């Protein structure tokens, strides 16, 4: 990142590239994609939506403020309705080819907190390879997303990677076009509504899929800007994992860049038809193969 006070612009690059430090983590990134989920790869989306703060109304002289004026002063943007809550922890196992337990993944919502003046959700994903895969690829990665509670835009995205003995820590501050960085931090300028891979995954849970034909958002993975396009494939079907059988909606996720779909990369997510829309299964297709991420925690 550039020195504090400077800004970078997120611009799509010609080909899909992996933002993590080694190809060994590609499967993990893809599984989370949406990540995109996210975390696989995730384009330019020119539709912007920003929340506006109601201007304060002040009475003149000694006149009393009207009810409308008082209401306008007190109005603040409301949080986007989301089904999950702070403190949620979901554990998954990763199936890769012949390996029925290639890795473990934990998705959690540690807290809601203020970040540089923004109210944010704190999302976290941690991945660890398991034996025998670990004997080849020893991976212990953690990703932290700070997502605006009102707009669901990413404010900060952290990658803490420990892959085959190589450790990398990186923090990205994202600022939508037209806004200024806060607290003098170096920032990446992105399109309005841009998510990071992890925040994009969580945002799928807040979509009303019965009334949303297609959900599109730009996603920045730390190097490239993509567009995530998701739609409901099957409203309701049975999905079986080790902890039981659940009724879930099947949502297909595709990644686009320059309005063209990125080949060889896709994601399907099964969201339980429960109160919190729990991701029960995620299946990712990437160049390294097919990955199935199954919920290991008890079903809701």
Image (cartoon, helix red, strand yellow):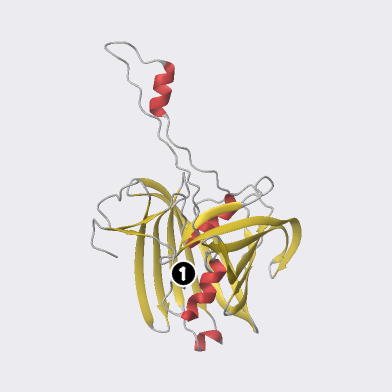
Percent across and percent down for residue 208 are 64, 47
Number of dots carrying numbers: 1
* Local SS, label 1: loop
- Along the viewing direction, whichever of 209 and 295 lies nearer the viewer: 209
- 190 to 255, vertically: above or below: above
Q: Which residue is mark 1?
A: 14
> In the displayed structure, would residue 99 be above or below residue 198?
below
Q: Quadrant of residue 296?
A: bottom right
Q: Residues within 10 Å of mark 1 (few under 14, many from 20)?
A: few
Residue 192 in percent (x, y) is at 44, 49
Q: Is residue 179 visible in this depiction of the protein?
A: yes
Which of 208/297 is in front?
208
At horizontal 40% and vertical 34% (from top left) the residue drawn is: 53
Q: Residue at x 49, y 65 (%)?
A: 125
Q: Where's the N terminus, which quadrant?
A: bottom left
**Residue 10's quadrant in the figure?**
bottom left
Q: Who's the residue at 48% across and 42% down the image?
A: 79
Viewer-side residue, 286 vs 104 = 286
The quarter of the rendered structure image containing the C terminus is: bottom right
Q: Residue at x 56, y 53 (%)?
A: 216
- On the question of residue 34 being in view, the answer is no
Q: Is residue 140 above or below residue 272?
A: below
Task: State the image coordinates of residue 2 (x, y, percent, origin top left).
Answer: 26, 64
Q: Is residue 237 left or right of residue 172?
A: right
Q: Position of residue 298 (x, y in %)?
A: 64, 63
């Amino acid at each position: 990142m550039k020195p504090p006070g400077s800004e970078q612009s997120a611009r799509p690059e010609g080909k899909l590239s992996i933002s993590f430090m080694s190809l060994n983590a590609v499967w993990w990134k893809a599984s989370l994609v949406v990540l995109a989920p996210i975390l696989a790869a995730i384009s330019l989306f020119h539709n912007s939506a920003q929340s506006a703060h109601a201007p304060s109304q002040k009475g003149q002289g000694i006149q009393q403020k009207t009810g409308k004026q008082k209401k306008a002063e007190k109005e603040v943007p409301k949080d986007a309705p989301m089904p999950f809550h702070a403190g949620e922890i979901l554990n998954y196992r990763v199936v890769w080819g012949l390996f029925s337990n290639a890795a473990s993944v934990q998705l959690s919502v540690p807290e809601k907190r203020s970040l540089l003046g923004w109210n944010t959700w704190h999302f976290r994903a941690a991945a660890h390879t398991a034996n025998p895969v670990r004997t080849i690829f020893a991976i212990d990665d953690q990703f932290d997303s700070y997502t605006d509670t009102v707009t669901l835009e990413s404010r900060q995205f952290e990658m803490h990677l420990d892959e085959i003995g190589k450790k990398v820590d990186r923090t990205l501050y994202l600022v939508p076009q037209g806004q200024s960085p806060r607290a003098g931090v170096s920032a990446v300028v992105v399109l309005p509504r841009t998510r990071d891979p992890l925040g994009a995954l969580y945002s799928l849970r807040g979509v009303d899929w019965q009334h949303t034909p297609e959900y599109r958002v730009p996603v920045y993975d730390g190097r490239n800007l993509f567009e995530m396009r998701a739609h409901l494939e099957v409203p309701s079907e049975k999905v079986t994992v080790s902890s039981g059988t659940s009724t879930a909606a099947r949502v297909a996720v595709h990644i686009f860049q320059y309005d063209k779909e990125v080949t060889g990369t896709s994601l399907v997510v099964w969201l339980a038809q429960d109160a919190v829309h729990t991701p029960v299964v995620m299946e990712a297709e990437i160049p390294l193969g097919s990955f199935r991420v199954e919920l290991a925690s008890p079903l809701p």
